[in-house]
Amino acid sequence: MTDQNVLFQPFRAGDIELANRIVMAPLTRDRSGPDRVPRALAVEYYAQRSTAGLIVSEATQISPQGQGYLDTPGIYNSAQVRGWKRVTDAVHARGGKIVLQLWHVGRISHTSLQPGGKAPVAPSAIRADGKTFTAHGMEQVSAPRALTAGEIPLIVNDYRRATELALDAGFDGVEVHAANGYLIDQFLRDKTNRRDDAWGGSIPNRLRFLRAVLDAVIGVAGSGRTGIRISPTTPANDIADSEPTKLFNAVIDDLKTRHLAYTHVIEGATGGPRDVLPFDYDAFRVRHGGTWMVNNGYDRAMAVDAVRSGHADLVAFGRPFIANPDLVDRLREGHPLAKPNPKTLYGGGAEGYTDYPAFAG
């Protein structure tokens, strides 16, 4: 195997056999409609990209309360399971593998997206400085209310049930979304978690929600079909921590005991910059010891170097997969990459979604 071929070799991530080391990162496209059910276009969209070693689905809310953006899909009722089953069947028919990303946005939502127009929920009643996509365009997120201690186990159970439904829908596993300032991340960080009960305060207490979610998910899917996404340094969605290295050392120490299918790490902030805070990702990778997936602005040369050097086992590509359904072939052959139309990234129909052609030579 030459250095240039390392991306295109088979790899086993936990219990999931991958044809190559190239992963399609989760990409929110806001095309599911008001019923939160993946449409026929989603079947075509994912099938077109099934040459990826692994597809991580767009973030999918585990409950109506978990929604934070217009027209994102759910995984909490039978219609959604049927919609996703059409997707997984299409991906598998082309030899691909796909996992569902489990999502609860916490405070990054708007009352118009919440059941009954109620306030979003969060560890603490601290409003984020940020916007979200609603029926009226981009709007300031709403002020959240703090979850009661009694409500938290109910959300953990939503993760458990969503995992059951994801497997019913034919997914090869699930990815727990613990990144980018959403609910799990909000529990982890001291900027957003000001609780004085067993779910806040010390790092072990702030880790408690993540641990409970992982216990619930693994109890259904098994550790070999469970992945996780983390973002140690991202400022996304007004998130921060006073001691991120200390916090995420504790996170990694917990993850390495669980033998997950993979840990998916956003280096820096999604979409850039890559370097937000000084951070030794290689030290994290060594501390973790398991399957390590990197993400954020990788090109072919960077991806090859990451795998060749041992910096990563898998490399996730996000936006390149939008305009290049045949990204794996383009990377293998060194073909130029098309660029996505920024006007069609979110919402709409086939334009800018399923109409990007394969490389024509």
Image (spheres, rainbow, N blue to C red):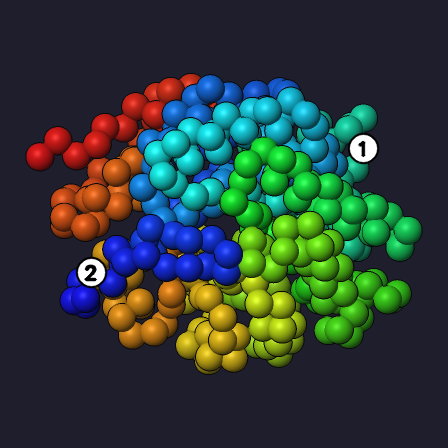
Q: Please tell me whether residue 275 is drawn above or below residue 235 in the rendered image.
A: below
Dot 2 lies on which element? helix
Q: How many marks?
A: 2
Instruction: Please state which amino acid type lies under the numbered disc 2.
Output: Asn
Tell whether label 2 touches label 1 (CB within 8 Å).
no
Dot 1 lies on which element? loop
> Is any atom of residue 279 visible in this view?
no
Front position in the image: 332 or 136: 332
Front: mark 1 or 2:
2
Q: What residue sits 43% from the left and 43% below the top?
A: 97
N-terminal of the pair, mark 1 or mark 2, is 2
Indicate the quadrant where residue 314 lies: bottom left
Instruction: Please state which amino acid type lies under the numbered disc 1.
Output: Lys
Q: What residue sits 26% from the left and 38% below the top?
A: 326
Quickly name the residue at label 2: 5
Viewport quadrant of the C terminus: top left
Q: Please tell me whether residue 106 is drawn above or below residue 119 in the rendered image.
A: below
Q: Please tell me whether residue 360 is drawn above or below residue 188 in the rendered image.
A: above
Viewport quadrant of the N terminus: bottom left
Indicate the quadrant where residue 2 lies: bottom left
Quickly name the residue at label 1: 118
Q: What residue sits 46% from the left and 66% below the top?
A: 291
Q: Identify the mark at residue 322; answer none if there is no mark.
A: none
Q: Position of residue 319 (x, y in %)?
A: 35, 43
Q: Residues within 10 Å of mark 2 (few under 14, many from 20)?
A: few
How far apart are labels 1 and 2 at the CA level?
52 Å
Q: Position of residue 90 (x, y in %)?
A: 42, 29
Q: Residues within 10 Å of mark 1 (few under 14, many from 20)?
A: some
> Is any atom of residue 315 visible in this view?
yes
Q: What residue sits 50% from the left and 25% below the top?
A: 86
